[in-house]
Amino acid sequence: MTISPSIRDQKPATARREGHPGIALAVIAACQLMVVLDSTIVNIALPHIQEALAFSTTGLTWVISAYTLTFGGLLLLGGRAGDILGRRRVFMTGILLFTFASLLGGLAQEPWQLLAARAVQGIGGAIASPTALALITTTFPEGPQRNRAFGIFAGVSAGGGAIGLLAGGMLTEWLDWRWVLFVNVPIGILIAVLTPRYINESQSHPGRFDVTGALTSTAGMASLVYGFIRASEQGWRDGLTIGSFGAAAVLLLAFLLVENRAKEPITPLRMFADRNRSGTYVIMLSLAAAMFGMFFFIVLFVQNVLGYSPIRAGLAFLPVTAAIALGAGLSQRFLPVLGPKPFLATGTALAVVGLTWQTFIDTGSSYVGGVLGPMVMFGFGMGLNFVTLTLTAVSGVALHEAGAASALLNTMQQVGGSLGLSILTTVFGTASKDAAKTQVPLFQANGTAAQKAEFARSGQLPAPWGHEVLAHGISTAFVPAAAMAGVALVVAAVVIRVRRSDLEALSGTAGA
């Protein structure tokens, strides 16, 4: 990740606590690790959550979307709250809210209880995460010490996903799926206890909260996501489906009107006036939409079709993390020499190829031939894009607005992931229903009496018929995922026009 100059250049408002900078950094990094880790640690547990709480496969997507929608939708508001109310105070509020929601999620007995807890987790993460980064400036003096802290923070952000995959697998297999949420409780309590002892408070700054903008955007996107998921289950003519899309249109239009008139908007619409920045946001939105769907469906495939244990499933995703890290390292090193265009074009092209490859997944696919190859290709392409997109997003932005530009890119990633997952789920649901029409008669003709009795009770086709339905739905869902990456490729090739004269400014914002 990169450090925005608006945060790096801020001066602390209060005297720093001396003597324990390592503990202070550990507290800040632990918060970021917990928030980042939570976007992947739950993924590995999804099949077990589905079985325990009787989620449908389409409904299961809300376990991911409930978190990412509130996190992405309120991220900018959380950063603003830290500036206005004091960063340490807001940081602790976010941590305590995240911790309490994790406890409730682990105790959930009904699907709605887990989804409500995940939504509150997202709110807590949106409050704590941007404030954690800003707290580094009030804790470490400008220079090598602060740069080192930024580097550790960035490393935790980058590695959190991989840690989450492994931790999710171990906790699910050795304990229970509920521990992917319970694990946050002791960590959160420890952070809350240590924060007032080792973290400085920042000076409060006058300002306004654009609560209306944050709520209308989040509610509008939630309605849109719900509309797609509802359509996959009840059809496009369902009254609630139509109503959800109508509500989304009204809320998102209201959001645009509010932001256009607000004196201190949560989403400055002028950020979209520059073609490079707008193109960058579209690329991130499109790639995140495909990426969230890929992780969701491949987790189901390797555990439900290939029969992997949770730990083995977590290990199966580590090559993707390595590919992302390799791509990010190469782009960061050669970006000043080659410019962003080659990395964006190559990265998005690799993503398209990897996702297209995954449209051929079926019950005969092995991990190496059907999963590993396309995932590594997609991951390397995303690695080439992440650093490049962040730098391109802040290219040509005034110093005091660079933080908003980069934060908006993060918001696009979270919101794009939620929206894309809902669209892919709709395609998955329709394709699965079509496949079931073929597989159910075969099952009725060849299944055992015990299997038929279980099918009558649960409505779930047993293997191998159920595997055929799941694999067909997954492979079909990757078709629009590849199309989404194709949109990103077109934008990267046609829209992005960053000049070589911008490279010095771009590398200057890279930070630690």
Image (cartoon, helix red, strand yellow):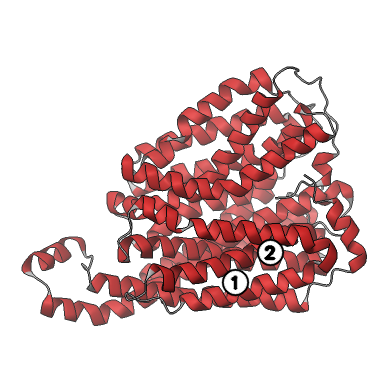
Between disc 1 and disc 2, whose residue precedes?
1
Q: Kindly indicate the quadrant of the structure image that contains residue 273.
A: bottom right
Read off the residue under disc 2: 385
Q: Is residue 79 left or right of residue 448?
A: right
Horizontal and vertical percent position of residue 84 = 76, 33
Query: For residue 434, which numbered disc appears in the image?
Result: none
Q: Are marks 1 and 2 in contact (CB under 8 Å)?
A: yes
The residue that appears at 50% across and 33% down in the rendered structure is 99
Q: Secondary structure at mark 2?
A: helix
Horizontal and vertical percent position of residue 494 = 77, 79
Counting labels gives 2
Horizontal and vertical percent position of residue 434 = 32, 80
**Is residue 227 shown above or below 354?**
above
**Is residue 348 shown above or below 262?**
below
Image quadrant holding the C terminus, namely: top right
Q: Secondary structure at mark 1?
A: helix
Cα distance in 3D space between marks 1 and 2: 10 Å
Q: Kindly indicate the quadrant of the structure image that contains residue 146.
A: top right
Asked if one can make out residue 355 in the rendered structure from this viewpoint, the answer is yes
Horizontal and vertical percent position of residue 243 = 48, 65
Q: Kindly indicate the quadrant of the structure image that contains residue 140.
A: top right
Disc 1 residue type (three-letter): Ala
The residue that appears at 58% across and 64% down in the rendered structure is 379
Read off the residue under disc 1: 351
